[in-house]
Amino acid sequence: MDTSLLDPPAVAGPATTLSWPAPDPTARRRAPRTRRTVVLTIAATVAALASIAIGNTAVGAIAVLFVISWPLERLWRRHPVGVRRLALRTDLAYAVASPALQFVGLVAAVALAAVSLAWLPGLALRPVVGLLPGWVRTTAGILLFDLLVYWTHRWSHTVPLFWRFHAIHHSTRHLDWVSGFRTHPLDGAFIAPAFALVLAAGFDPEITGALAVLQFVVGIWAHLNVRWRLRKLRFLVLTPDFHHWHHANEPEAINTNFSTLLPVWDLLFGTFRMPDGPGPQRYGVDEAVPSSIGAQLLYPFRRTGRRTRRRGVHADAATD
């Protein structure tokens, strides 16, 4: 058995040299226009049109998302990043491949839900849940599922095995309309025990399904490159400002804002961060995550020597 997946994370000290420093805010720039990028753009356009012709709705959905998001990011832009930014092709590849990746994640999730035995405490709760009035049961199901998602997300940052997969999502150095698609399929599978518990407890399956869809849509909204503060909503629901702090690669933002829908859990467990003043300036991870989608999908399974978790470690400590 390969025990490397369970190895504790290496902690960067003053003498440690990290291979993937967080980006300098002044270094944001467009991707260079070369003959290769022009050829790839043309090829990708042809492939996208062919994909639509054979019924791949993901490509059409991406186009709709862009049409909706682009004006918002132009009018209320948080960071001066052009549409044709660095690593855009990687994030677009994740978006186009999302149906296939989601299928892989679903298969893994079903297996993980079964072996996790999370359905056992769910069965124990089932008689109690059955006694609840309809609206109370619905409200309790929503709160329970969102709480379990909070802790699953929190563990994906603190458990080394989980972080190997979740680091892919955090490796993007630009947050915008398409960056939220960059997710390893097995990263999403870790939420399966929460589904198993809630379903086994007797809560309506439509609740968890609707919440999963809602969290996906809210997640896309939360990654937008917009400067909205929305202070009146910050204690009620996930906002872009809230989630940008979660992605920030800055010491004061480490291990904060884990909620994916209701910030109440961060308030209760002491991980809420929404300071006044300028928003976060640095995103990304402190480890050498590959840039292509294929290499990223294989990255969690590879031993790359000394591995440094982003959570709790900041690149500036190694570069000062």
Image: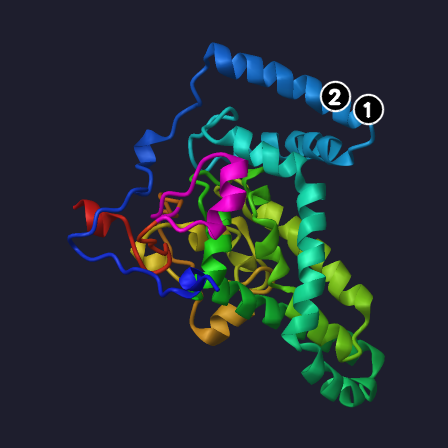
Q: Nearer the viewer, residue 298 or 151?
A: 298
Tell me if residue 180 comes above or below residue 7 in the rendering: above
Residue 297, magenta (yes or no): yes
* Residue at the farthest front position: 1
Residue 268 in percent (x, y) is at: 49, 75
Q: How many marks do you count on the picture?
A: 2
The percent coordinates of residue 87 (x first, y second) are 48, 31
User: Mark 2 near mark 1, Cβ–Cβ under 8 Å?
Assistant: yes
Q: Which residues are magenta?
A: 285-304
State the residue position of label 2: 49
* Whole-number angstrom distance, CA of label 2 to CA of label 1: 6 Å
Q: Is residue 93 above or below residue 282?
A: above
Is 171 positioned to the left or the right of 19 in the image? Answer: right
Q: Which mark is residue 53?
A: 1
Work out whether residue 144 or residue 172 is closer to the camera in this orientation and state it.
172
* Viewer-closest of 3 and 55: 3
Q: Amino acid at mark 2?
A: Leu
Secondary structure type for disc 1: helix
Across and down, in percent, residue 319 comes to 20, 45
Amino acid type for the residue under numbered disc 1: Ala
Please say whether residue 72 is visible from this viewpoint.
no
